[in-house]
Amino acid sequence: MNFDKYFTMSEADAALYAKTKLDFFGKDEELVCKEIGDGNLNYIFKIDSLSTSKSLIIKQSGPVARISDEFKLSADRNRIEYEILKYQSTLAPGLVPEVYSYDPIMNCTSMEDLSDHVIMRTEMINHKQFKKFADDITTFMVNTLLLTSDVCMEHKAKKELVKNFINPELCEISEDLVYTEPFSDINNRNDIFAPNVDWVKENIYSDEALKLETAKLKFDFMNNAQALVHGDLHTGSIFIKEDSTKVIDPEFAFYGPMGYDVGNVIANLMFALANAQAYEKAEQIKWLEDTIVEVIDLFKEKFSKAWDEKASEYTAKYKGFKEYYLDTVLRDTAAVTGLEGIRRIVGIAHVKDITSIQDEEKRTKAERLCMLASKSFIMNREELKTGKDFLEVIKKTTVK
Ligand code: SR1
Ligand code: MG
C-alpha cells in the first residue's frame, strides 16, 4: 500500500500510514489503531504502540461531512487546521495540541494524543468543574484574537494572514447553519425536538425584528475581517483536565469578528447550565454561573492589559478608542451567544448538553429557556458590558 493518491483510510490503513510515513514510532513497533471521532466532519484515528507508551492522533478529512453528505468540503481545511495550530502555539503556548505533520495528498495531519484530557462537553454533562478553565480560555482568546488584529499586527502582514486563512466553504457552513437556517428553514434541514416545533414557528420563524438583526449580523460575519478566529469554539472543541486546557479543531478558522469565538464559549456554557438546571445540580449551576461572569470579565481585563502593552497601531492609542473597540467586541459576543444559542436547538447540529436531557418536559423547557435568553442576547446586544450583565440575561429569562 502506498499513500501517493488520496483515499479515505480504514483503521488498518492509518496504522500503516503511521508506521511507514511518519517519523514517530520505531520501525519494529507493533501499532494498534482505533477510529475515535464523534464530530460532524472528520475521521480521527488514535494510534498506540503496543511496546512503548507512545501514541498519536491522525486526523483525516473526507470529501464530505460525516454528519451529512450534503456538505461537500474542501480538504484545504486540513491545511488550515495544521497551520493555525502551529501559529496559535506561538501566540498561546500550552493551550493547543502540538502538531507533527501535514500531508496534502492524504489530507491528514498528525498531532499530539490528548487522551489524558476529556472533551469538555462530556465533562459538563457529567457535571464536573474546572478551576482553571476561565483563566485558560480567556488567555487563549485574548492572545489569538487581539494579537492577530490590526491593533497589534503590521497591517500588510495581517492581510497576508487574511489571505492564507481564507476558508470559503467552512464559512458558508456557518453562514447557513448559524445565521440563516435557524431563522428561516430555507433548506428544509432544521431538526426541532417535536414538542417545540410549533413554539419555534411562533417565536423564532415569525419574529421579523429578530430576523432583521440576524441579517445584519450575518453581513458582519462575512465582512468584518477583524482577527484570526477559531471559528467553532464550543465545548466539543476543548480538551480539558484539572490542570490543563487545550483548544482543538480550528478547521473553521478565518478572519472574522472576535466576538464569534467569545460568544461561542458563552453559549456553550449556557447549554451546560441548562443541563445542570434540568438535573438540579446546585453546585454545577453555581460554578457555571460564576464561570460565565468570569469569562467575560477576565476577557475584558486581559484584553485591556494586552492592548496597553502590545498595541502597535498609532490610532489605537487615542483616548477612548480601546473602550469603544472592546464595547463592539462585547456587543458581537452577545449576538453570537444568541445565534449559537438558537442554532444548536433549531438547526441541524445539536449539542448533547440539551439532547441528553431525558425528561421530555425538562428538555422542552431547557430549550425554550435557551432560545428566549438567546433572543434577548441578540436584541439587547448593545447593552451588555459586564459578566454580570451576561449572566442576568440568562437568569432573568423565564418560560411561561
Ligand atoms: C456540517 S458541520 C455542522 C457543525 O459542526 C461543526 O462543529 C460546526 O459547528 C458546524 O456548524
Ligand atoms: Mg469540530
Image (spheres, rainbow, N blue to C red):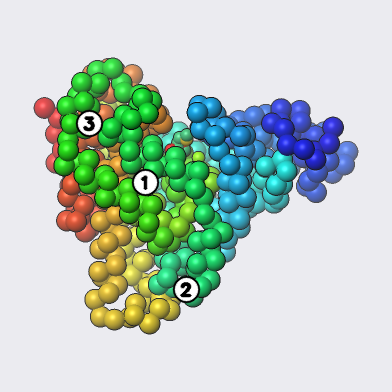
**Which of marks 3 and 1 precedes in the sequence?**
3
| Residue plotted at (50% across, 67% down) | 159
Whichever of callouts 2 and 1 sits on the residue coming sooner in the sequence is: 2
Amino acid marked by disc 3:
Tyr
| Residue 291 showing in the rendered view | no
Taking the image as drawn, is residue 233 in sight? yes
Q: Which mark is residue 155?
A: 2
Q: Nearer the viewer, residue 40 or 300?
A: 40
x, y percent for residue 286: 27, 42
Q: CA distance from mark 2 to mark 3?
A: 41 Å
Type of amino acid at the residue the image marks with label 1: Asn
Q: Quadrant of residue 306?
A: bottom left
Lateral position of residue 226 relative to residue 58, left or right: left
User: Which residue position is annotated with label 1?
Assistant: 264
Q: What percent of the width, then of the height, locates residue 269?
A: 34, 42
User: How many residues crowd mark 1 within 10 Å: few (<14), some (14–19), many (20+)?
Assistant: many
3D distance between C-alphas at marks 2 and 1: 27 Å
Q: Residue at x 38, y 25 (%)?
A: 189
Q: What SS does tag 2 mark?
A: helix
**Quarter of the image with the N terminus in it:** top right
